[in-house]
Image (spheres, helix red, strand yellow):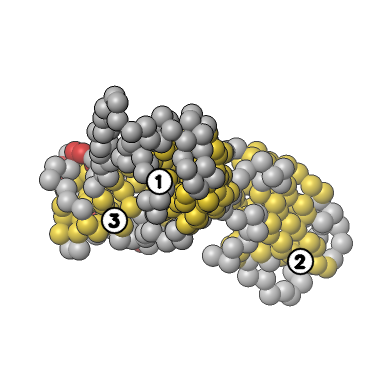
């Protein structure tokens, strides 16, 4: 019985090596900044495994060549993602790290490392107690940020966001003159800081004024907008501690659907041949279900349902074709042909290829290969 077990284990190891098995960690990606103590999703893809359903992996957090903590053990390879509560790694310090997804048993020597990313401490915003305004004293204005909100409320990557800020004079006197109000928008690494100064006219008692700023969500993660009233300290107020408001919001990542096909192909005329196309999600977020349109000359158009695809996941579709005449035949495939999916890029959903029909036993040179609209 033991001999049989060892032979089985050795056979799986040998097959995985023979198939050139690889693991690719997609998330965290380069430039990501994760908050210590938060919950984050680790994603990976794989290829070349003889029996991926039987493979398990261990996930570890590393700093350089040192393992900081084991995130999870004995996770199915085909799970493709793992939700990690980083609070489980006790004593975690701010700094740069990477994640390794390694195939079990360790003798396999097959693993994938993420790009280097940042773990940062969660920011703490402390509200300063309001200063009392004693009765009988000089009546003064009191500027404050009454409310902040964004449209859309839950932005995705590449959306244009409008930040609204409502300002109010909550004091016992009007402001005697105009003042400056600043909005500064900061985001993840790579996000270009946006700054704008507004000139606010004098406000009567309890009068409100609204300012807004448009900016693009060019990077996904946490974006924070800081609104500061009387930024040049031009107004003497009853309370100077409520002139600033920080409004954070998240920007969701997007999928990126790419069309691929085997091209060119060679077909004997009057003979059926099975061909294939692929829809793959190369983005950092799950893609919702959509439709695929597939055209082959002399064989018409068919539609296929594309299921939800995790980052790095692909779906293969097949169909049989037959040509009645010799020569080149055009083929084309469009993923998300009804344009229902918001994506990182809309320019890689279409792929064109060709089939060459010839007489049986006629000499031809035809080496089909997987070609994708994004060139990868």
Q: Which of labels 2 and 1 is toward the front?
A: 1
Disc on the earlier residue, 3 or 2: 3
Give residue 12's position: percent from left, percent from top: 30, 51
Is residue 25 visible from the viewing direction of this image? no
Q: Which residue is mark 2?
A: 356
Give residue 37's position: percent from left, percent from top: 24, 40
Q: Quadrant of residue 23?
A: bottom left
The quadrant in which the C terminus is found is: bottom right
Secondary structure beneath dot 2 equals strand
Q: Decide: is 165 above or below 356.
A: above
Depth check: 226 or 28 in front?
226
Secondary structure beneath dot 3 equals strand
Between the C-alphas of marks 3 and 1, the distance is: 41 Å
Q: Which residue is mark 1?
A: 235
Residue located 61% across and 45% down the image: 342
Q: Which of labels 3 and 2 is toward the front?
A: 3
Secondary structure beneath dot 1 equals loop
Residue located 41% across and 29% down the image: 172
Using residue 291 as the reference point, say whether residue 156 is left or right of it: left
Residue located 14% across and 42% down the image: 90
Q: Residue furthest right?
A: 325
- Residue 118: mark in rendering: 3
Q: Quadrant of residue 306?
A: top right
């Amino acid at each position: 019985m033991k001999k049989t077990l060892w032979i089985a284990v050795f056979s799986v190891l040998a097959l995985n090596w023979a198939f050139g098995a690889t693991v690719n960690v997609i998330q965290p990606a380069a430039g990501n900044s994760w908050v210590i103590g938060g919950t984050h999703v680790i994603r990976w893809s794989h290829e070349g495994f003889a029996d991926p359903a039987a493979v398990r992996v261990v996930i570890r957090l590393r700093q350089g060549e040192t393992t900081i903590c084991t995130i999870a053990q004995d996770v199915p390879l085909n799970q493709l993602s793992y939700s990690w509560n980083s609070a489980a790694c006790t004593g975690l310090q701010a700094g740069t790290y990477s994640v390794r997804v390694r195939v079990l048993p360790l003798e396999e020597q097959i693993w994938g490392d993420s790009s280097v990313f940042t773990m940062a401490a969660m920011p703490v915003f402390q509200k300063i107690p309001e200063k009392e305004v004693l009765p009988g004293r000089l009546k003064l204005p009191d500027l404050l940020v009454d409310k902040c909100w964004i449209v859309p409320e839950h932005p995705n990557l590449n959306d244009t966001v409008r930040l609204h800020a409502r300002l109010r004079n909550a004091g016992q006197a009007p402001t005697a003159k105009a003042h400056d109000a600043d909005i500064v928008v900061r985001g993840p690494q790579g996000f270009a800081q946006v700054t704008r100064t507004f000139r606010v006219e004098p406000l009567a008692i309890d009068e409100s004024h609204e300012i807004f700023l448009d900016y693009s969500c060019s990077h996904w993660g946490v974006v924070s907008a800081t609104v500061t009233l009387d930024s040049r300290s031009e107004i003497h107020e009853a309370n100077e501690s409520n002139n600033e408001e920080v409004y954070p919001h998240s920007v969701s990542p997007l999928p990126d659907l790419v069309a691929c096909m085997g091209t060119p192909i060679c077909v004997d005329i009057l003979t059926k041949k099975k061909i294939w196309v692929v829809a793959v999600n190369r983005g950092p977020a799950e893609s919702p279900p959509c439709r695929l349109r597939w055209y082959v000359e002399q064989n018409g158009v068919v539609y296929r349902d594309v299921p939800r695809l995790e980052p790095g996941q692909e779906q293969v579709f097949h169909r049989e074709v037959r040509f009645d005449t010799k020569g080149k035949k055009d083929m084309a495939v469009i993923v998300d042909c009804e344009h229902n999916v918001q994506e990182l890029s809309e320019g890689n959903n279409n792929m064109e290829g060709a089939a060459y029909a010839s007489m049986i036993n006629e000499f031809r040179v035809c080496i089909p290969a997987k070609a994708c609209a994004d060139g990868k």
